[in-house]
Amino acid sequence: MEKERHVLVVFPHPDDEAFGVSGTIIKHIQNGTPVTYACLTLGEMARNLGNPPFATRESLPEIRKAELIKAANIMGIQDLRLMGYRDKTLEFENEEELANMVFKMIEELNPSLIISFYPGYSVHPDHEATARAVVRAVRRLPKDKRPKLHCVAFSNNHEEELGKADIIHDVSDVWDQKADVLKAHISQTAWMMDEMLEQVAAKNPAWVERMLNERFWTYNWEKDQVL
């Protein structure tokens, strides 16, 4: 993995990083690259309250905040930023203000790589609003000054329209740490942790492909359609 000057990760919810990005983050940090993770909300409107339930709607925000801090510590992230937006409301925020928030971090950190969702291919309205804000912020820079933008996509038609992933990181060497990151978000992952760990340990091809290979699409500026 290429050593970066600085990696900026921007996602809307605690645990958005866990499944498809945490291994990549760990490997960047092991490579000596500083990583900043900006999490826009606390995921306080999540449906899952633990399995069996151990959270309430009132207690969930603080629980998810603690889970995120624990996950960041496991990954080795020293710069975790909680941006203070409310879960399931990002689509209603002023889009220029969201882009301004991201742009200010780009100005401060001067990242060589940004990781977020791919607009149009990330399903959840909060994911989409975050993805659009990131693209708008990066677009403000001259083309030769823009950081690389590696995006996560998982809609039903993303490979049909975007093609196969441009970048695949084999994170099998940091699987134990990635599994610990997933466990840290236990209010959201308890329902699947046992099966996931068993299937990966058994080298089930589908689970190995899903959990040990993290996929990214390089944002295509030639087909930039974010308004």
Image (cartoon, helix red, strand yellow):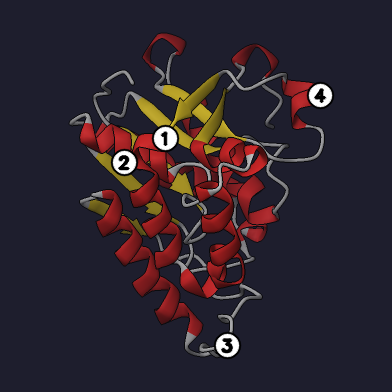
| Residue contact between numbered discs 3 and 4, judged by CB atoms under 8 Å | no
Nearer to the camera, 131 or 92: 131
**Drawn side of residue 20 relative to residue 102, left or right:** right
First in sequence: mark 1 vs mark 4: 4
Task: From the image, tell me which residue sits under label 2.
Answer: 26
- Nearer the observer, disc 2 or disc 4? 2
Q: For the residue labelled by badge 3, is the local secondary structure a helix, a strand or a loop?
A: loop
Residue found 54% across the figure and 48% down from its top: 200
| Residue contact between numbered discs 2 and 4, judged by CB atoms under 8 Å | no
First in sequence: mark 3 vs mark 1: 3
Task: From the image, tell me which residue sits under label 3.
Answer: 53
- Nearer the observer, disc 1 or disc 4? 1
Label number found at residue 171: 1
| Residue contact between numbered discs 2 and 1, judged by CB atoms under 8 Å | yes
Task: From the image, tell me which residue sits under label 4.
Answer: 160
As drawn, 2 above or below 172: above
Q: Amino acid at mark 4?
A: Glu
Regarding residue 18, the answer to whether it shows in the image is yes
